[in-house]
Image (cartoon, coloured by chain):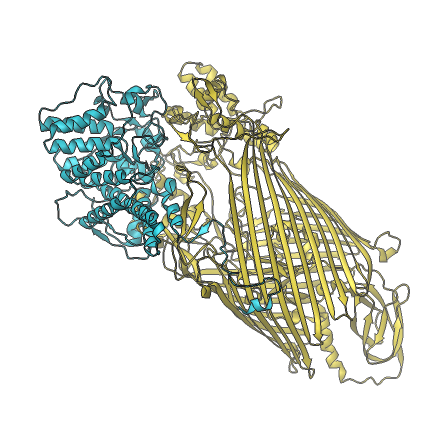
Amino acid sequence: MKRLFTLTLVLVCLMGKQAISQQTFPLRGKVIDAVSGEELPGALVKVSDSQRATVADASGEFSIRLEEGEYEIILSFIGYTPQKYLVKLPQSEPLKVTLKPEGLSMAAVEIVSTGYQELPRERATGSFVFLDKETVSRRITPNFLDRLEDVTPGLTFNRGGTDPISIRGRSTIFANNRPLVVIDNFPYDGPLENINPNDIESISVLRDAAAASIWGAQAGNGVIVITTKSGSFSSPVRVDITSNYSITDRPDAFYPQLMGPETYIDIEKQLFGRGFYTGTENSIARAPLSPVVETLIDLREGRINQGQADARISGLAAHDVRHDFNAYMYRPRIHNQQAITVSGGGQNSRYSISGGYDKLVSELLGNDNGRYTFSVKNDSRLLKEKLNITSGLYVVKSSSNNNSINPATLTMQASGAERLYPYARLRDENGNKLPITYEYRRDFILESERNGLLDWQFSPLQDIDARNNSIEALDLRMNLGAEYSLHKNLVVSANYQYWQNESTGSNLNSTETYFTRNLINRLTQVTEQGLVYPVPVGAILDRSQGRSFSQQLRGLVRYNNKWKGKHDLSLIGGAELRDLSSSSFSNRFFGFDTETGSTSVVDLVNFFNLYHMPNSVTRIPNLQGISGNVERFTSVFANAGYTYADRYLLSLSARKDASNIFGVDTNLRGVPLWSFGAGWILSEEGFYGLDWLPFLKLRFTQGYNGNVDRTLSAQTTAQIFGDSFLTGRPFARIQNPPNPLLRWERISISNFALDFESRNGRLSGTFEYYIKNGIDLIGEAPFAPSSGVSQFRGNIASTNTKGMDINIQSFNLTGMFKWSTNYILSTVNEKITDYEIMASPGQYLTFGAMGAVPLPFEGRPLYSVYAMPWAGLNPDNGNPRGFLDGEPSENYAAIFANTTADDLLYMGPARPTLFGAVRNSFEYKNISLSFTLAYRAGYYYRRESIIYGSNFGLGGHSDYDLRWKQPGDENLTQVPSVPQTGNFNRDDLYRFADILVERGDHIRLRDIRLAYRLNNSDSGRLPFRNAEVFFYADNLGVIWKKSSDPLDPDFRNLNQLKNFSMGLNVSF
Amino acid sequence: MKSCAALLLLFSSCDGFLDEKPSLSLVVPSKLADFEALLNNDNQVFNISPAIGEIGSADYFTTVERWETYSTQLEREAYIWGDEVHANGNMPDWATPFQQIFYANVVLDGIAALNISSEEQAQAERLKGTALFFRANAYHNLMVLFCPFARFDDTSDKLGLPIRASSNIQDPITRASLQEVKDFIKKDLEEALDLVPETEPMKTLPSKLTVLSLLMRVHFMEADYSKALDYGLLAMEYSPELIDLTALPQSAANPFGIFNKEVVFYSHLNPYNYFNSPLTFVDENLLELYGDDDSRVGHFFIDRGTGGLNVKAFHTGRNLWFGGIGTNEIYLTVSECLARDGRLEEAAQILESLLENRIFDLEPVTFENSTEALDFILKERRKELLFRGIRWMDLRRLNEEGAGIILTRQLGENTITLSPNSPRYVFPLPPSEVERSGIEQNPR
């Protein structure tokens, strides 16, 4: 790491020294390939500033005699980056010299890519995280984004919320919150899951203002720059094969703490006794009743006797549907991945061809997907290397089947229950698939069938088999670039990218599916002539087609000059255009015959009576629609870098973006962004005397990012819909009220950093501290309903974020047994500094920690956990108590009425404020072992508990069993007694009480990787260059947590799924 | 732009490159067609009426268990005329009419800003008239819930509503006086009357008959019977049609159907849980008013064996309660105004033409005196115009005239009553409104 730099540094010192000794000593060494470990026979070994040179022999070894002293030697070999080394004679041991293949040289010297330019890390002033191939390929996931977790300081994965990842906290409240992904120099418009991680050479994550002034308004949330693999010039054909297989734990239906069948049935009996089901029993919509309630009705009506009822109920109670979920609907997820890359190059051209196949069988029965990726990348140097032409083609073909039913959301319809009655059975003893009570009452279904309607039962397992819902997609990306050196200092280039994605969805609902049978039955008309079917008896096919394409074009002029040995200037100027459009249409075909493709015409205009609810009417639900979107950007930008005397760095960048934001005056469409950076390599200074720390650098950037909420507009905008329910005429909905003051969000970022490296690179690292200030952020203000809108979005918020990112690499042991440790640590402290309008206390309690619409509160992080003060249970009746005028009280309505948002207890941030990971790697001979511990701290979450609602908490949390039952219980439990009358305020007082808020701090064993590597250079007898067999285990679980809550703080609804992979990488 | 100069090789011109709209379905409403589309937003915006008044009218009752388990506090509180008639601070019955007013204002401001060509003139007028009607309708619906009753000749200073006459949502919000609100409503309707079309094929949009009917209702509900009669008689000139319920089979599940000929203006009540519940029973005193020869019993009500009669079907033709204007309202209102004017024969004649379609073998309707006439007409009004929000308006009107109707709710042991002219006939504003705009809350 940074060796090149250290080298030049020492070299400078060397210049003044004179060799005076006369005796000669042998300089011995061996040249090997840095990546494969093979010897490099024929490598040229040259002594700097002299004519002395030699060539490595067949085993890569060389020897040359020189006088005592220090020398710089230069090693070179075709296809490899020349390397300089310093040696001191006499040697203590032979030199081992590694050369890096040219294609990989970037990674080797940590050349960070901003997507526009590649620059050595030492020259950079901005905040970059560089992830090399090894880091990217360490984790085994189908999606590259997951591979950034716990290796990228400042990047968090948010569990829950609409933003899956954020870089250095969330930079916006409502506007686009996704980091920009750049692949091969262009923003990527397609779905991220189309990127094959095996094609990735390296990733740079840009975290500060330098990113935005390079990438503009789309970069406000950080930028992830992906560089794909290339071949190498003048190198023989190389074949790399990767194959891995991974198996992920099955989800566990018992993980969420929910009441079991016994408790559930008890409550159903109580509710039945209170006449709770009378309404449903006579429901107009024939709403369903669970088997226990049906049994109780049968008993009441005298259709069965007490003994029969008890037997039936105890038979039901003996079964827990969660066993069925685990056995029949969940399964282990299996993913296998194969990839092959062929690369190589001649004197003036290089190529890389790769293909990959991924197959994923989901943990949900009925879902799977496959992906084929293919890419060709080619570079040619023409006209004496003055013209460089690059081209690339990437094709992804993917298909997925989505036929699952998620057990977690499967419920009895229209019952208000959040989950299925827990004693449902999905199969009988003989394995036959059973129907469940689903949308209508048992008797109604039977009666309808007798009246000639189609079978109206719903069996989840049968339905999964019957469904046929698939999506096929083809994704195509082509790019072409040309770079021409007009002069040794001046280069012009143009890049163009075309991207296209077509996807076809086909949802064939045969008459076997519940969907089709239900729709036909609901619309069946009873007439004097008999049954009439407005929806024909036959399959229903929903087809949808989406097509997106984008074109991007960039022109660039680059000027580089070094003069007088001290000045180094690079200038870039350019402009770009981006045009992204997408269109889609969908249609529904009735009476579809799969044999002949024939379809039937239906009456979409007239109303029909509903069979199950004849006093109401409906139209046949239609699915036709056409939509289209266009996003356009134009940008001009300039970028300057200046280095003086290899130690003073200065960078400036500016950019202006404009976009087709709707209904906005032209002058407000654009936003100017800029950044400034400075760096000082302290260790280059004459006065610098720390021998043990040969590299020390300070750097700083300051600048502005921007962001925009494209859904907003300065004028009233409305969305037009095809047909209104009542009249079938086109109608419009006002999307947003006019906002003449709408402007871009701006985020100013200051970044202070220190980079260091100890002698021999044993310890190196980076400390960064940043301050982000969000200005004019778009916020949502609750509005007085009499204005006509109940919320309003405008530039009303300001935020302040401070944080630190630390990355340290330490080589603890070198030699035969190697041990290195990588530490990353990040802190993020976010605060809303200005937000005029408060939400209601209820909203903060319910959605403050996590919600589709964030609720800012001045002085607090955007996502915060709030609570109500808890005064314990009333010892007499187990009622929860809060405080009213400082006294314990059960007057819930008054407690809430007298609670303002300021009175709420602020428990703390809902997202980690401190997080990071420690990875230890060990290597002995060919074996390497590494494991990662990841930690998150400084945040809070609310533990789930029983909410009684108006049905005694039916189907709710298993805390029900711990509830207060009799005086004295208040010393053992905090769970309130069952209320006789549903009282939402009473529920809320408990569920939002401070006693249910827990600290989220925890440490988890992220992963373990064990690999065995074989290099041909060791024996020379292997049929390949090198090979690696590895075993990888991921998501291994929490090893320490602050709270005593039994569930994982970050995975509340479903257990985090352990993953085990094994694989093979071979290079020929 | 400079960038374009550099990139001309691909895109021949940059003019308009950034003018492309981001979404096909997005518009800045600026053409008559856009305003037409806004006014056609029937099922989500315009053709929904507030319903808490209907909950409070006590024409139906439910069991204490069912009351306790009603899923929203708003419904439970409205049922007992309580103080907390809101769900988490919000109340659709307040917000929806103001949303209608906002949409109407967007259309009115938009049309005002257009240069209308001569061929667009007719359409522009129709849209303007429609928007004015919707705005007036929304204000009247709000007024009967959130403002105290005031006769037309009552000039005392009473709390009205915020008057929103522009689409600028940032305009300051203050409560105008009740008189100003009433004047605003009447002015809108009178203007609309000249603009709306003679006939309108869609029952969700106003025609002349619709505006006349609403003018009639607005005046009638402030006890200005002579003006109400003027408008009612104008409405009668359109020969409002009636369905002969006596000719329909009593077993018909949906006897009226959607957009039937008795619908002058389609609107449904905000769908609350009460309306679809088999435990929502029609008040027994009300049921007693129907004679054995009344065809309405079978069409309006159904016995599901739950311990009382439920509502079967109404003029929406859907499982939603009606909240619009029906032809039957015109007949009953005109008849009552005539009776109050002493024109008993005409009153009887109009009522008879309605009842012919309701009662099997109807005996001729004749009145001896005004008291008897009014008594009879009010009874018929109660039997005909139920579960559509009108009873609430009538209770306020009749009690002010001294009818002394006391409403009671029995919840287990507890009896809750609403005495005539109680301040509880005025619903409290939702807390979200009071908190955010700072306007004055209604006294309770």
Q: Who's cyan, chain-wise?
A: B
Q: Nearer the viewer, residue B307 or A378?
A: A378
Q: Position of residue A969 (x, y in %)?
A: 40, 36
Q: Is residue A429 left or right of residue B261?
A: right
| Residue A261 relative to residue A739: left or right | right
Residue A241 pos. (x, y %)? 77, 50
Where's residue A176, x and y in %?
50, 56
* Residue A770 seen anywhere in this rendered image of the structure: yes
How many dots with numbers?
0
Residue A476 in the image, given as x and y percentages of width and height: 66, 51
| Chain ID, yellow in image | A
Viewed as shown, does residue A487 lie left or right of A993? right
Q: Nearer the viewer, residue A781 or A65?
A: A781
Quick check: can you spot residue B404? no
Occupied quadrant, residue A963:
top left
The residue lying at 47 percent from left, 24 percent from top is A524
Q: Is residue B432 above or below residue A107?
A: above
Q: Quadrant of residue A26?
A: bottom right
